[in-house]
Structures are given as structure tokens and as C-alpha cells.
Amino acid sequence: MRAHRPMINLALIGFMGTGKSAVGRLVAKQLRFDFLDTDACIEAQTGLRIAELFARAGEAAFREHERRLVDDLGRMTRTVIATGGGLAANEQNLASLKQHALVVCLWASPETIWDRVADQSHRPLLRDPDPLAKIRLLLAQREPFYRQADVLVNTDRRSIKEVAHQITHQYRLARNAAPPP
Ligand code: S3P
């Protein structure tokens, strides 16, 4: 753990299918924090599902929505923030999250990710003739960003409950070690 700064919030980053939303909801309950999902925020702001937004406006427009939302997240307090899988694969977004949150990355192998998302169809980036190859490629591209998290948690063969307990514990340790805001 390398965080020596105020940590008012907790941000979950990591690839699609690593459990950010499910784990995040449980961690928020355990810490008595609010919960915010960046994809859900963008859907509420635009009135479009993420897949529709990609189809109508393109990925670059979606990334711009993410970038603007990241600026607003600094105003949150006592909030667990579950980010879309690509949001933290960007130096500015990552640096911005680190100003107010403990950044925790949920990790899983490409095979585990594929197992978890294979029966879901709402992720435009995985609508590919070879989704497992696409997962491997994107994960390799994003790994250098994900590795900059304060805490890296492997979720392979672990339940949502186990992962959530570990993160809640890590957050309490980190917050107690950090200087007051
Ligand atoms: C994306 C991940 C998705 C969503 C969008 C793009 C990505 O979020 O933001 O489809 O680039 O990895 P989840 O990680 O919650 O699936």
C-alpha cells in the first residue's frame, strides 16, 4: 500500500467483469458510505444505455463523458466509486481519483473475465468475433494503468463477499495511516 494522502472516498478500478459494481455496493454497505457507479451516472446524464451511447456517439464521446464526470467526483465525500473498466486507463483520470480516494484495482485473469461476462451482451467493446482475444489485448494495454492503484486485489476464484471484506479492511488501515484531510 502506497497511499499517504487524505482518502475521503474509495475508488474501484479494473477490467470489465472483475466485480467492481457488486463488490463496491457491499463495501459501501460495510463502510456506511454512499455508492456511485460511473456508467450508471453517464446513463442517467445522457438518457442512453452505454451501448447506445457508443453506437450513436462513438467511444471518444463516451470517454469525454467519463473525463467530465471524473472532475466532479472530487466533490464526493464518503463514497465508494465503481468506475467503468476504461476510465482509469488514462493518466489524468487516475491522478484525479488519487487526489481524494484510495484507489483499489480488482484484477482477474482473461479466462475468468470471459467466464463472467460471456452471457452478458451490454458491453460494446466485447462485441467482437474473438472476445477472449479482445479481453487479452485490452487487459495487456491497460495493465500499466491498473498497476498504479494503491491496492491490487486478485478476484480469481474468490467470492464477492471475500473480496469486499478484504477491501473494507484495507481501506480502514489506509485511512487510519493517512494524515487528516
Ligand atoms: C468499458 C467498461 C464498461 C463500460 C464501457 C466501457 C471499458 O464498464 O464503461 O462498456 O472500456 O472497459 P464495466 O467495467 O463496468 O463493464
Image: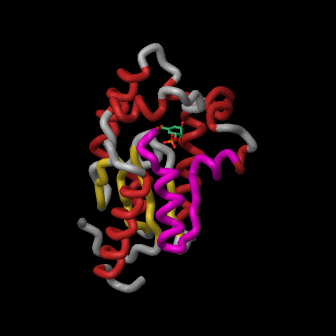
Outermost residue toward the top?
Answer: 129
Q: Is residue 114 magenta?
A: no
Residue 5 visible in rendering:
no
Q: Quadrant of the C terminus?
A: bottom left
Q: Residue at x 28, y 74 (%)?
A: 4
Most prominent secondary structure in the magenta stretch?
helix
Q: Position of residue 77 (x, y in %)?
A: 54, 74
- Residue drawn at x 30%, y 61% is 150
Percent across and percent down for residue 146 are 33, 48
Between 63 and 32, the one nearer to me in the picture? 32
Q: Residue at x 46, y 50 (%)?
A: 20
Q: Look at 39% across and 34% down and name the residue there.
A: 113
Side (left or right) of 55 relative to 24: right
Residue 32 image point, x, y percent: 53, 74
**32 part of magenta stretch:** yes
Q: Is residue 43 visible from the viewing direction of this image?
A: yes
Number of marks:
0
What is the magenta range?
A: 17-43
